[in-house]
Structure formats: C-alpha cells, structure tokens
Image: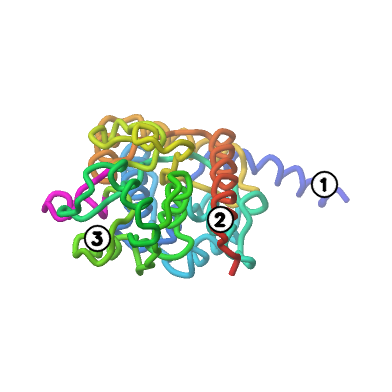
Amino acid sequence: MRILTSTLIAAVIALPVQAADYPTKPVRVLVPYAPGGVVDTSTRILTNKMAEMTGWIFVVDNRPGASGFIATGTAAKASPDGYTLLSAHTGEFAVTPLLFKNTPYDFDRDFVPIVMVSDAPMLVVVNAKSPYNSLKDFIAAAKAKPGSISFGSPGTGSVNHMATEWFTSAAGIKTLHVPYKGGAPAVTAVAANEVGYTVAGLPGVLPHLQANRVKVLGITMAKRSPQTPDFPSMEESGVKGVDASIWVGLFAPKGTPKDVLGKIHAASVNALKQDDVKKRYATVGGAEVSGLGSAEFTKRVRADAARYKKVAAQVGLQQQ
C-alpha cells in the first residue's frame, strides 16, 4: 500500500513538471493535404515563426487523401501529450462530417481547438474574357438561363463546392457543378474556358490573375476583406446571408493537459502578432491572422457546421 501510494504521489507531482518542461522533443503537426496548399502553407508559416521565437522543433507531416480522414483520424487517435497536433481547415470539421456517415473522428469527442490561425475569403472567378464584369451581371445572366453556366470545384462536398451552393441558393440561381481533382485544376479550367466560373482561395487564383487569364467578380464573405480590398463582398453585390471563408486552425487530441495547450496557444498567438507573419499570410493566401482561443474558436467551428448543414439540406446533398 505504501509503495502504491508513493507511486501515485510521484506521478501527480511529475505531471506539472513535464508540462512545464514541454516540449522536450520535436512536435509533429499533421496536415491533411499535400505540400503547397493553403493548410500546408499556413502551417509552415506559423511553425517556422514559432520555432524561430521559442527554439521548439516542429515536423510538418503531410498525410493527404481520403477527404482528410487519414491525417485527422491519425491525430484523433494520437497520444494526448502535446507532441502530435493537427492543422486543419473549415472542411475537416464544418463540412466533411455532414457528408460522410462513417467519419473516423468526431470534433467534440476527439479534439480540443488550440488557436484559429488564419481566415481567408474565397473568390468568385470567371474567365478574363467573360462578359460578366460584376456579380450582379453574373446573377442576372444565370437567372435568365437557369443551369446554363457551369462551375468547377475541388470535388463534391469540398468547402469550395459548399460555399458555391450557398452563394447560388442565396442568389436564387441554378448553375451546373463540374468537380475536379483539386482547387488548382478548377481554376485552370476557368482560365481555359472549360467551365464558367469557380469559387477558390487566392493562392490558386493569383498566378492566373496576374497573367490576365481570369478576373474576380467578388468574394464569398458578407463584408469586404482588408486582405482583398479591391473585390466587393456578397452584401455589396446584393446577395444576403452568405459569409463563407476558409479558416485554418491548430488542434490537439482530447485530453492534452491544459497547461501544455496554454503554452502552445501563447506561442502561437505571439508568432501571429509579428508584422512579418501578418504580411506573409496576406501575401501568400490573402488571409488575415486570427489568434482566437479555444472557446471562441469552438463557437466558430460549430457555427460554420450549422450553416453548412443548412446548405447541404437545401441542395439535397446526401451522406455517403
């Protein structure tokens, strides 16, 4: 009995010491997408700055595929010790669970949000030679000939697809969905005039925009974004109730010690406050840094999930 009691006391005493010393080894950050995408880029900007400022070592582990299930499912089952984190975006927690019956993770059961890293608008993009010069022009044409205009997306059920359905439903128009294998191919299809338009993040649009192959009619957010000030918002274009963006956030497995989560959050927020980091996010992805903590970030995830659930019901998307 004395040995057992001593062991328990030693364990209790040891826990705060371990948390105080965190991290004592590299921290793995799982990313559900290939290198170069918005989540990967956002993750590397953050972890590189955190490493520079704290001396911590981060290993970004890209696990693309299966609608994000591979990386997210792996993170959900990881030891809750702060040495395996997940960097994910709107799709993993606000969209994908609505579309698949057997999602191998659950937001509330398996994860704790640490910090919302960035938030970026999506752009409504048409070919540079398109006759539409504003969203109002586009909506009028789509209403005149329902179903005659096609749109490309990174795939059925992607956040881009769902944002497009949200926009078209609110605008009272019908357009034809053409899924592609990624956001970049969808934008390329618009540049090649294969489809009429797409809704995409700035990183995939920028090369075509700079080469004058596409033009932007507006963004999918309710208000104009300070990172893309030249592009009108949905409300400015007469479309009410649409406010779709792509956030990226950092998550830990449920059960990770609170003081470890606190250290990660503090280091993240400190990195996000730096001017060079803000500039990098704005330049690379048209994103605004966030820094929302766990409680507020949780509210945002749940609010987005509720919004997209309504969209899925409105357009008749069924769980697979």
Asked if labels 1 and 2 touch by Cβ distance under 8 angstroms, the answer is no
Q: Is residue 170 left or right of residue 55?
A: right
Q: For the residue marked with disc 3, what is the amino acid?
A: Val
Within 10 Å of disc 3 (Cα), the crowding (few <14, some 14-19, many 20+) is many
* Disc 2: which residue: 312
Tell me where residue 101 appears, x and y as whole percent.
64, 66
Q: For the residue marked with disc 2, what is the amino acid?
A: Ala
Q: Earlier in the sequence, mark 2 or mark 1?
A: 1
Q: Magenta span covers which residues?
A: 203-217
The residue lying at 48 percent from left, 37 percent from top is 241
* Disc 3: which residue: 190
Q: Is 38 colored magenta in this rendering?
A: no
Q: CA distance from mark 2 to mark 3?
A: 25 Å
* Disc 1: which residue: 5
Q: CA distance from mark 2 to mark 1?
A: 55 Å
| Residue in the foreground of this view, choosing between 132 and 121 | 132
Task: Label 3, secondary structure: give it.
Answer: helix
Q: CA distance from mark 1 to mark 3?
A: 68 Å
The residue lying at 33 percent from left, 33 percent from top is 225
Q: Is 209 colored magenta in this rendering?
A: yes
| Residue in the foreground of this view, choosing between 66 and 86 | 66
Q: How is the image coloured?
A: rainbow
